[in-house]
Image: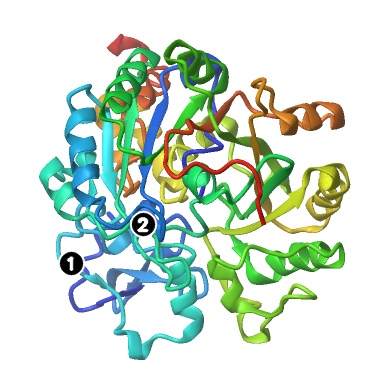
Amino acid sequence: MVVDQEKCIGCGICTVYCPADAIRLVTVDGKRKAEIDQDACLECGTCIRSRVVKCPRGAIYELPKEERSMGRQMRRFFSDPSTAHPRTGVPGRGTEEVKTNDVTGRVCRGELGLCLEMGRPALGTSVREIEKATMHLARCGIVLEDCNPLTDLIEDITTGKFREEYLDERFVSAIIEFRIPFERGEEILNVIRDIAAEIDTVFSLDMITCYDEDGTLPGLELCRSLGISVRDNCKVNLGVGRPYKIERQD
Amino acid sequence: MSHSLHRRGTAESLSHDYILLVTAAAGINAAGSKDKLRRVLDVVWEVGPVNTGSNEVGTILSGVSIEEIKAGFTEIPRVRCVFDSADKMREVIRRLLEMDLGISVTVSGPRLEIEKICAEFGIKPHSVNLSLDIWGKKNELPEEEILEFITMCGHGMISRSLVVDCIEKVKAGRLTPEQAAVRMGSPCVCGFYNPTRAIPMLQKYVPAEKH
Protein backbone atom coordinates (compact mmCIF):
# COMPACT_ATOMS: atom_id res chain seq x y z
CA MET A 1 0.00 0.00 0.00
CA VAL A 2 1.11 3.55 -0.66
CA VAL A 3 0.22 6.99 0.73
CA ASP A 4 -0.57 9.75 -1.73
CA GLN A 5 1.55 12.51 -0.22
CA GLU A 6 -0.46 15.22 -1.95
CA LYS A 7 -3.71 14.07 -0.35
CA CYS A 8 -2.39 13.12 3.12
CA ILE A 9 -3.03 15.75 5.80
CA GLY A 10 -0.94 14.00 8.45
CA CYS A 11 -3.83 13.38 10.85
CA GLY A 12 -2.32 10.00 11.82
CA ILE A 13 -5.68 8.24 12.07
CA CYS A 14 -4.31 5.30 10.04
CA THR A 15 -1.20 4.50 12.07
CA VAL A 16 -2.64 2.37 14.87
CA TYR A 17 -4.65 0.14 12.55
CA CYS A 18 -1.70 -1.46 10.77
CA PRO A 19 -1.11 -5.03 12.07
CA ALA A 20 2.50 -4.79 10.89
CA ASP A 21 3.18 -1.35 12.40
CA ALA A 22 4.25 -0.23 8.93
CA ILE A 23 2.67 3.25 8.97
CA ARG A 24 4.61 6.12 10.51
CA LEU A 25 4.18 9.87 10.60
CA VAL A 26 7.17 11.72 9.15
CA THR A 27 7.90 15.37 8.48
CA VAL A 28 8.28 16.31 4.81
CA ASP A 29 9.09 19.94 3.98
CA GLY A 30 7.84 20.96 7.39
CA LYS A 31 4.54 19.11 7.03
CA ARG A 32 3.43 15.96 8.84
CA LYS A 33 2.69 13.08 6.48
CA ALA A 34 1.94 9.37 6.81
CA GLU A 35 4.41 7.04 5.17
CA ILE A 36 4.28 3.26 4.68
CA ASP A 37 7.46 1.23 5.14
CA GLN A 38 7.32 -1.08 2.13
CA ASP A 39 9.49 -3.76 3.73
CA ALA A 40 7.16 -3.93 6.72
CA CYS A 41 3.84 -3.61 4.81
CA LEU A 42 2.23 -7.04 4.44
CA GLU A 43 -0.45 -5.87 1.95
CA CYS A 44 -3.31 -6.90 4.28
CA GLY A 45 -5.52 -4.10 2.95
CA THR A 46 -6.72 -2.86 6.34
CA CYS A 47 -5.59 0.73 5.71
CA ILE A 48 -7.52 1.05 2.43
CA ARG A 49 -10.85 -0.24 3.78
CA SER A 50 -13.03 2.85 3.99
CA ARG A 51 -15.27 1.34 6.68
CA VAL A 52 -12.26 0.67 8.90
CA VAL A 53 -9.68 3.45 8.81
CA LYS A 54 -11.92 6.21 7.47
CA CYS A 55 -9.03 8.31 6.09
CA PRO A 56 -10.61 11.75 5.63
CA ARG A 57 -8.88 12.25 2.29
CA GLY A 58 -8.80 8.68 0.96
CA ALA A 59 -5.04 9.09 0.72
CA ILE A 60 -3.97 5.43 0.93
CA TYR A 61 -4.14 3.30 -2.19
CA GLU A 62 -2.82 0.16 -3.80
CA LEU A 63 -0.59 0.28 -6.87
CA PRO A 64 -2.10 -1.29 -10.00
CA LYS A 65 -1.34 -5.01 -10.33
CA GLU A 66 1.13 -4.50 -13.19
CA GLU A 67 3.23 -2.24 -10.94
CA ARG A 68 3.35 -4.75 -8.06
CA SER A 69 6.05 -7.40 -7.89
CA MET A 70 5.08 -11.06 -7.63
CA GLY A 71 6.38 -10.99 -4.06
CA ARG A 72 4.01 -8.19 -3.12
CA GLN A 73 1.10 -10.02 -4.75
CA MET A 74 1.99 -13.09 -2.68
CA ARG A 75 2.03 -10.99 0.49
CA ARG A 76 -1.55 -10.09 -0.26
CA PHE A 77 -2.73 -13.70 -0.63
CA PHE A 78 -1.33 -14.55 2.82
CA SER A 79 -2.37 -11.37 4.56
CA ASP A 80 -5.63 -10.02 3.13
CA PRO A 81 -8.57 -12.25 4.18
CA SER A 82 -10.74 -10.96 1.35
CA THR A 83 -8.38 -12.37 -1.28
CA ALA A 84 -9.01 -15.86 -2.67
CA HIS A 85 -5.95 -17.61 -4.06
CA PRO A 86 -6.62 -19.32 -7.43
CA ARG A 87 -5.40 -22.65 -6.03
CA THR A 88 -7.97 -22.80 -3.22
CA GLY A 89 -10.77 -20.72 -4.70
CA VAL A 90 -11.86 -19.61 -1.24
CA PRO A 91 -10.84 -16.63 0.90
CA GLY A 92 -8.32 -17.40 3.63
CA ARG A 93 -4.89 -18.94 3.80
CA GLY A 94 -5.60 -22.65 3.60
CA THR A 95 -8.28 -25.26 3.04
CA GLU A 96 -11.68 -25.40 4.71
CA GLU A 97 -10.00 -27.84 7.15
CA VAL A 98 -12.62 -29.17 9.60
CA LYS A 99 -15.39 -26.88 8.34
CA THR A 100 -16.46 -29.25 5.55
CA ASN A 101 -14.67 -32.36 6.78
CA ASP A 102 -17.92 -34.35 7.08
CA VAL A 103 -18.34 -34.24 3.29
CA THR A 104 -14.75 -33.87 2.01
CA GLY A 105 -13.33 -36.57 4.31
CA ARG A 106 -10.07 -34.63 4.34
CA VAL A 107 -9.28 -36.26 7.68
CA CYS A 108 -10.97 -39.59 8.39
CA ARG A 109 -10.92 -42.00 11.33
CA GLY A 110 -7.47 -43.45 11.93
CA GLU A 111 -5.83 -40.21 10.79
CA LEU A 112 -4.77 -36.87 12.21
CA GLY A 113 -4.82 -33.51 10.43
CA LEU A 114 -2.16 -31.09 11.62
CA CYS A 115 -1.78 -27.39 10.82
CA LEU A 116 1.07 -25.12 11.83
CA GLU A 117 -0.27 -21.59 11.48
CA MET A 118 3.03 -19.81 11.11
CA GLY A 119 3.22 -16.26 12.46
CA ARG A 120 -0.11 -16.51 14.27
CA PRO A 121 -0.81 -14.71 16.51
CA ALA A 122 0.52 -11.18 16.20
CA LEU A 123 4.11 -11.74 15.03
CA GLY A 124 3.81 -12.62 11.34
CA THR A 125 6.33 -14.76 9.52
CA SER A 126 8.86 -14.69 6.73
CA VAL A 127 8.93 -17.45 4.12
CA ARG A 128 12.38 -18.35 5.44
CA GLU A 129 10.83 -19.34 8.79
CA ILE A 130 8.12 -21.35 7.04
CA GLU A 131 10.82 -23.17 5.11
CA LYS A 132 12.55 -24.26 8.31
CA ALA A 133 9.35 -26.10 9.24
CA THR A 134 8.60 -27.57 5.81
CA MET A 135 12.15 -28.90 5.44
CA HIS A 136 11.94 -30.62 8.83
CA LEU A 137 8.64 -32.19 7.85
CA ALA A 138 9.81 -33.19 4.38
CA ARG A 139 12.70 -35.12 5.94
CA CYS A 140 10.04 -37.22 7.70
CA GLY A 141 8.30 -37.90 4.40
CA ILE A 142 5.36 -35.63 5.17
CA VAL A 143 3.30 -34.74 2.11
CA LEU A 144 1.92 -31.22 2.45
CA GLU A 145 -1.65 -30.33 1.52
CA ASP A 146 -1.67 -29.49 -2.19
CA CYS A 147 -4.74 -27.21 -2.05
CA ASN A 148 -2.94 -24.46 -0.15
CA PRO A 149 -1.45 -21.18 -1.43
CA LEU A 150 1.99 -22.22 -0.11
CA THR A 151 2.21 -24.93 -2.78
CA ASP A 152 2.86 -22.33 -5.49
CA LEU A 153 5.88 -20.94 -3.62
CA ILE A 154 7.59 -24.28 -3.02
CA GLU A 155 10.43 -25.20 -5.35
CA ASP A 156 10.73 -28.85 -4.37
CA ILE A 157 7.93 -30.57 -2.49
CA THR A 158 10.22 -33.50 -1.58
CA THR A 159 12.67 -31.26 0.32
CA GLY A 160 10.28 -28.54 1.49
CA LYS A 161 12.55 -25.94 -0.14
CA PHE A 162 10.96 -22.69 -1.25
CA ARG A 163 11.81 -20.65 -4.32
CA GLU A 164 14.70 -18.32 -3.55
CA GLU A 165 12.91 -15.16 -4.70
CA TYR A 166 10.22 -15.56 -2.01
CA LEU A 167 12.38 -16.34 1.02
CA ASP A 168 12.44 -12.79 2.38
CA GLU A 169 8.77 -12.08 1.81
CA ARG A 170 6.71 -11.66 4.97
CA PHE A 171 3.08 -12.58 5.63
CA VAL A 172 0.54 -12.05 8.43
CA SER A 173 0.38 -15.85 8.61
CA ALA A 174 0.63 -18.96 6.47
CA ILE A 175 -0.67 -22.45 7.14
CA ILE A 176 1.35 -25.63 6.77
CA GLU A 177 -1.29 -28.37 6.48
CA PHE A 178 -0.92 -32.12 6.24
CA ARG A 179 -2.51 -35.40 7.19
CA ILE A 180 -0.81 -38.41 8.81
CA PRO A 181 -1.84 -41.89 9.92
CA PHE A 182 -2.73 -41.78 13.61
CA GLU A 183 0.17 -44.13 14.39
CA ARG A 184 2.67 -41.43 13.40
CA GLY A 185 1.15 -38.84 15.76
CA GLU A 186 3.72 -39.10 18.56
CA GLU A 187 6.68 -39.05 16.16
CA ILE A 188 5.47 -36.00 14.24
CA LEU A 189 4.44 -34.05 17.33
CA ASN A 190 8.00 -34.51 18.58
CA VAL A 191 9.30 -33.16 15.26
CA ILE A 192 7.00 -30.16 15.75
CA ARG A 193 8.62 -29.57 19.15
CA ASP A 194 11.98 -29.40 17.35
CA ILE A 195 10.57 -26.92 14.82
CA ALA A 196 9.25 -24.72 17.64
CA ALA A 197 12.72 -24.57 19.19
CA GLU A 198 14.32 -23.51 15.92
CA ILE A 199 12.07 -20.86 14.42
CA ASP A 200 12.26 -17.13 14.94
CA THR A 201 8.51 -16.61 15.21
CA VAL A 202 5.48 -18.40 16.66
CA PHE A 203 2.85 -20.75 15.30
CA SER A 204 -0.57 -21.82 16.50
CA LEU A 205 -0.98 -25.56 16.27
CA ASP A 206 -4.23 -27.27 15.23
CA MET A 207 -5.09 -30.94 15.30
CA ILE A 208 -8.08 -32.40 13.45
CA THR A 209 -9.31 -35.73 14.78
CA CYS A 210 -12.54 -37.62 14.11
CA TYR A 211 -14.85 -38.85 16.86
CA ASP A 212 -14.87 -42.60 17.27
CA GLU A 213 -18.21 -44.43 17.27
CA ASP A 214 -18.28 -44.29 21.10
CA GLY A 215 -17.72 -40.50 21.10
CA THR A 216 -14.08 -40.53 22.17
CA LEU A 217 -11.42 -38.41 20.48
CA PRO A 218 -8.20 -40.38 19.88
CA GLY A 219 -6.22 -37.20 19.11
CA LEU A 220 -7.17 -35.69 22.44
CA GLU A 221 -6.00 -38.76 24.30
CA LEU A 222 -2.71 -38.70 22.39
CA CYS A 223 -2.04 -35.06 23.33
CA ARG A 224 -2.76 -35.79 26.97
CA SER A 225 -0.37 -38.72 26.95
CA LEU A 226 2.38 -36.51 25.50
CA GLY A 227 1.75 -33.64 27.91
CA ILE A 228 0.63 -31.31 25.12
CA SER A 229 -1.73 -28.56 26.21
CA VAL A 230 -5.17 -28.64 24.56
CA ARG A 231 -7.34 -25.58 24.96
CA ASP A 232 -10.96 -25.98 26.09
CA ASN A 233 -12.37 -24.04 23.14
CA CYS A 234 -12.26 -25.80 19.79
CA LYS A 235 -14.17 -26.21 16.56
CA VAL A 236 -16.65 -29.06 16.20
CA ASN A 237 -18.00 -30.31 12.87
CA LEU A 238 -21.52 -31.47 13.72
CA GLY A 239 -21.62 -34.06 10.93
CA VAL A 240 -24.85 -32.91 9.27
CA GLY A 241 -23.40 -32.38 5.77
CA ARG A 242 -24.11 -34.74 2.89
CA PRO A 243 -22.76 -36.92 1.33
CA TYR A 244 -21.23 -38.09 4.62
CA LYS A 245 -17.69 -39.42 4.77
CA ILE A 246 -15.75 -40.59 7.84
CA GLU A 247 -13.94 -43.75 6.72
CA ARG A 248 -11.17 -43.70 4.09
CA GLN A 249 -12.24 -45.87 1.18
CA ASP A 250 -9.31 -45.30 -1.21
CA MET B 1 -8.23 -21.68 7.57
CA SER B 2 -9.11 -22.04 11.21
CA HIS B 3 -9.68 -18.38 11.99
CA SER B 4 -12.24 -19.00 14.74
CA LEU B 5 -9.81 -21.28 16.60
CA HIS B 6 -7.14 -20.23 19.12
CA ARG B 7 -9.21 -17.55 20.87
CA ARG B 8 -7.75 -16.79 24.25
CA GLY B 9 -9.35 -15.77 27.53
CA THR B 10 -10.76 -17.11 30.74
CA ALA B 11 -13.25 -19.97 30.73
CA GLU B 12 -15.92 -17.57 31.93
CA SER B 13 -15.23 -15.11 29.10
CA LEU B 14 -15.10 -17.84 26.47
CA SER B 15 -18.45 -19.18 27.68
CA HIS B 16 -19.92 -16.11 25.94
CA ASP B 17 -18.23 -16.86 22.64
CA TYR B 18 -19.72 -19.24 20.05
CA ILE B 19 -19.20 -19.02 16.33
CA LEU B 20 -21.41 -20.68 13.75
CA LEU B 21 -19.90 -21.65 10.42
CA VAL B 22 -22.18 -23.02 7.72
CA THR B 23 -20.05 -23.89 4.71
CA ALA B 24 -20.80 -25.35 1.30
CA ALA B 25 -18.01 -27.61 0.04
CA ALA B 26 -16.40 -26.70 -3.28
CA GLY B 27 -16.94 -29.41 -5.89
CA ILE B 28 -19.27 -31.44 -3.64
CA ASN B 29 -22.39 -29.60 -2.54
CA ALA B 30 -21.64 -25.93 -3.29
CA ALA B 31 -23.37 -25.84 -6.68
CA GLY B 32 -26.77 -24.21 -6.31
CA SER B 33 -26.39 -23.67 -2.58
CA LYS B 34 -26.46 -19.86 -2.58
CA ASP B 35 -30.17 -19.60 -1.89
CA LYS B 36 -29.95 -22.24 0.85
CA LEU B 37 -27.26 -20.22 2.59
CA ARG B 38 -29.28 -17.03 2.24
CA ARG B 39 -32.17 -18.79 4.00
CA VAL B 40 -29.76 -19.95 6.70
CA LEU B 41 -28.61 -16.38 7.33
CA ASP B 42 -32.22 -15.18 7.56
CA VAL B 43 -33.07 -17.92 10.07
CA VAL B 44 -30.03 -17.51 12.31
CA TRP B 45 -30.26 -13.72 12.19
CA GLU B 46 -33.58 -13.98 14.06
CA VAL B 47 -31.75 -15.61 16.99
CA GLY B 48 -29.59 -12.51 17.48
CA PRO B 49 -25.92 -12.87 16.58
CA VAL B 50 -23.65 -10.18 18.00
CA ASN B 51 -21.64 -10.01 14.80
CA THR B 52 -21.72 -11.40 11.30
CA GLY B 53 -20.12 -10.54 8.02
CA SER B 54 -18.23 -11.80 5.04
CA ASN B 55 -14.77 -11.32 3.66
CA GLU B 56 -16.32 -9.94 0.50
CA VAL B 57 -18.34 -7.05 1.93
CA GLY B 58 -17.49 -6.57 5.62
CA THR B 59 -19.43 -6.81 8.87
CA ILE B 60 -22.55 -5.50 10.56
CA LEU B 61 -20.20 -3.98 13.15
CA SER B 62 -18.76 -1.71 10.47
CA GLY B 63 -22.17 -0.79 9.08
CA VAL B 64 -22.84 -3.46 6.43
CA SER B 65 -26.44 -4.74 6.21
CA ILE B 66 -27.58 -8.37 6.15
CA GLU B 67 -28.94 -7.79 2.64
CA GLU B 68 -25.50 -6.65 1.47
CA ILE B 69 -23.90 -9.75 3.01
CA LYS B 70 -26.41 -12.04 1.29
CA ALA B 71 -26.00 -10.25 -2.04
CA GLY B 72 -22.23 -10.69 -1.78
CA PHE B 73 -22.30 -14.50 -1.48
CA THR B 74 -19.88 -16.17 -3.89
CA GLU B 75 -20.32 -19.48 -5.72
CA ILE B 76 -18.92 -21.19 -2.61
CA PRO B 77 -21.18 -19.49 -0.07
CA ARG B 78 -20.61 -19.46 3.69
CA VAL B 79 -22.46 -18.11 6.72
CA ARG B 80 -20.51 -17.01 9.79
CA CYS B 81 -22.19 -15.60 12.92
CA VAL B 82 -21.01 -14.96 16.47
CA PHE B 83 -23.30 -15.62 19.43
CA ASP B 84 -22.79 -14.64 23.04
CA SER B 85 -24.43 -17.60 24.77
CA ALA B 86 -24.77 -21.36 24.59
CA ASP B 87 -28.55 -20.97 24.66
CA LYS B 88 -28.53 -18.96 21.45
CA MET B 89 -26.26 -21.49 19.80
CA ARG B 90 -28.56 -24.30 20.94
CA GLU B 91 -31.51 -22.51 19.31
CA VAL B 92 -29.53 -21.98 16.10
CA ILE B 93 -28.66 -25.66 15.91
CA ARG B 94 -32.29 -26.60 16.52
CA ARG B 95 -33.37 -24.42 13.60
CA LEU B 96 -30.65 -25.72 11.29
CA LEU B 97 -31.58 -29.32 12.05
CA GLU B 98 -35.16 -28.48 11.15
CA MET B 99 -33.99 -27.03 7.83
CA ASP B 100 -31.98 -30.22 7.10
CA LEU B 101 -30.05 -28.72 4.19
CA GLY B 102 -27.18 -31.21 4.01
CA ILE B 103 -24.61 -28.38 4.25
CA SER B 104 -21.75 -28.69 6.76
CA VAL B 105 -22.28 -26.98 10.10
CA THR B 106 -19.35 -26.29 12.42
CA VAL B 107 -19.43 -24.62 15.82
CA SER B 108 -16.48 -22.98 17.54
CA GLY B 109 -16.61 -22.64 21.30
CA PRO B 110 -16.09 -24.58 24.53
CA ARG B 111 -15.87 -28.26 23.49
CA LEU B 112 -17.72 -29.82 26.40
CA GLU B 113 -20.66 -27.46 26.03
CA ILE B 114 -20.90 -28.08 22.27
CA GLU B 115 -20.78 -31.84 22.82
CA LYS B 116 -23.53 -31.47 25.44
CA ILE B 117 -25.75 -29.61 22.95
CA CYS B 118 -25.07 -32.29 20.32
CA ALA B 119 -26.13 -34.99 22.78
CA GLU B 120 -29.35 -33.11 23.56
CA PHE B 121 -30.27 -33.20 19.87
CA GLY B 122 -29.05 -36.76 19.32
CA ILE B 123 -26.25 -35.61 16.99
CA LYS B 124 -23.01 -37.58 16.75
CA PRO B 125 -20.40 -34.95 15.83
CA HIS B 126 -18.03 -35.89 13.01
CA SER B 127 -14.69 -34.33 13.91
CA VAL B 128 -13.02 -31.57 15.84
CA ASN B 129 -10.22 -29.12 15.26
CA LEU B 130 -8.37 -28.83 18.56
CA SER B 131 -6.27 -25.85 19.53
CA LEU B 132 -2.91 -27.09 20.80
CA ASP B 133 -1.92 -23.57 21.82
CA ILE B 134 0.96 -21.37 20.69
CA TRP B 135 4.48 -22.71 20.01
CA GLY B 136 7.83 -21.11 19.25
CA LYS B 137 9.14 -17.70 20.27
CA LYS B 138 6.37 -16.86 22.71
CA ASN B 139 8.44 -14.32 24.63
CA GLU B 140 7.89 -11.88 21.73
CA LEU B 141 4.11 -12.04 21.97
CA PRO B 142 2.03 -9.19 23.39
CA GLU B 143 0.76 -9.56 26.95
CA GLU B 144 -2.06 -12.04 27.50
CA GLU B 145 -4.58 -9.21 28.10
CA ILE B 146 -3.82 -7.83 24.61
CA LEU B 147 -3.83 -11.29 23.01
CA GLU B 148 -7.36 -11.91 24.29
CA PHE B 149 -8.58 -9.13 21.98
CA ILE B 150 -6.22 -9.80 19.07
CA THR B 151 -7.11 -13.49 18.81
CA MET B 152 -10.78 -12.70 18.25
CA CYS B 153 -9.70 -12.01 14.66
CA GLY B 154 -7.95 -15.18 13.51
CA HIS B 155 -6.83 -13.46 10.32
CA GLY B 156 -4.67 -11.16 12.46
CA MET B 157 -6.25 -7.90 11.31
CA ILE B 158 -6.68 -6.37 14.78
CA SER B 159 -3.35 -4.75 15.55
CA ARG B 160 -1.63 -4.64 18.90
CA SER B 161 -1.38 -0.83 18.51
CA LEU B 162 -5.14 -0.49 18.01
CA VAL B 163 -5.90 -2.57 21.12
CA VAL B 164 -3.45 -0.54 23.19
CA ASP B 165 -4.84 2.72 21.80
CA CYS B 166 -8.43 1.69 22.63
CA ILE B 167 -7.45 0.67 26.16
CA GLU B 168 -5.60 3.97 26.69
CA LYS B 169 -8.64 5.92 25.50
CA VAL B 170 -10.91 3.98 27.87
CA LYS B 171 -8.49 4.67 30.72
CA ALA B 172 -8.51 8.37 29.83
CA GLY B 173 -12.30 8.44 29.67
CA ARG B 174 -12.22 9.37 25.95
CA LEU B 175 -14.04 6.20 24.87
CA THR B 176 -16.60 4.09 26.70
CA PRO B 177 -15.97 0.33 26.74
CA GLU B 178 -18.86 -0.01 24.28
CA GLN B 179 -17.32 2.50 21.86
CA ALA B 180 -13.87 0.97 22.20
CA ALA B 181 -15.28 -2.52 21.59
CA VAL B 182 -16.78 -1.42 18.27
CA ARG B 183 -13.71 0.54 17.13
CA MET B 184 -11.36 -2.31 17.94
CA GLY B 185 -13.46 -4.83 16.02
CA SER B 186 -13.81 -2.89 12.78
CA PRO B 187 -10.71 -4.37 11.03
CA CYS B 188 -12.05 -7.93 11.48
CA VAL B 189 -13.68 -8.14 8.04
CA CYS B 190 -15.14 -11.62 8.29
CA GLY B 191 -17.20 -10.79 11.39
CA PHE B 192 -15.71 -13.23 13.91
CA TYR B 193 -14.88 -10.56 16.47
CA ASN B 194 -17.22 -10.65 19.46
CA PRO B 195 -17.99 -7.10 20.68
CA THR B 196 -20.25 -8.30 23.49
CA ARG B 197 -17.40 -10.31 24.97
CA ALA B 198 -14.99 -7.39 24.52
CA ILE B 199 -17.06 -4.94 26.58
CA PRO B 200 -16.54 -6.58 30.00
CA MET B 201 -12.88 -7.13 29.08
CA LEU B 202 -12.61 -3.33 28.67
CA GLN B 203 -14.65 -2.40 31.76
CA LYS B 204 -11.69 -2.91 34.07
CA TYR B 205 -9.89 0.01 32.39
CA VAL B 206 -12.64 2.53 33.14
CA PRO B 207 -11.29 5.14 35.58
CA ALA B 208 -12.61 4.72 39.12
CA GLU B 209 -14.51 8.04 39.11
CA LYS B 210 -16.61 6.88 36.13
CA HIS B 211 -17.89 3.79 37.92
User: Farthest residue toward the front?
Assistant: A249
Q: Amino acid at mark 2?
A: Thr
- Name which quarter of the figure residue A110 lies in: top right
Identify whether A157 is placed above or below A53: below
Q: Residue at x 58, y 34 (%)?
A: B128
Residue position marked by numbered label 2 in the rendering: A15
Residue position marked by numbered label 1 in the rendering: A58
Q: Quadrant of the N terminus of chain A?
A: bottom left
Label 1 sits on a secondary structure element that is loop
Label 2 sits on a secondary structure element that is helix
In the image, A39 versus B42, the foreground residue is B42
Residue B174 appears in view? no
User: Farthest residue toward the bottom?
Assistant: A66
Q: Position of residue B112 (x, y in %)?
A: 57, 17
Q: Residue at x 29, y 69 (%)?
A: A33
Q: Position of residue A237 (x, y in %)?
A: 50, 34
Q: Amino acid at mark 1?
A: Gly
In the image, B66 versus B163, the foreground residue is B66
Q: Residue at x 71, y 44 (%)?
A: A112
Tally of numbered discs: 2
- Name which quarter of the figure residue A216 lies in: top right
Q: Is residue A219 left or right of residue A173?
A: right
Indicate the colouring scheme.
Answer: rainbow
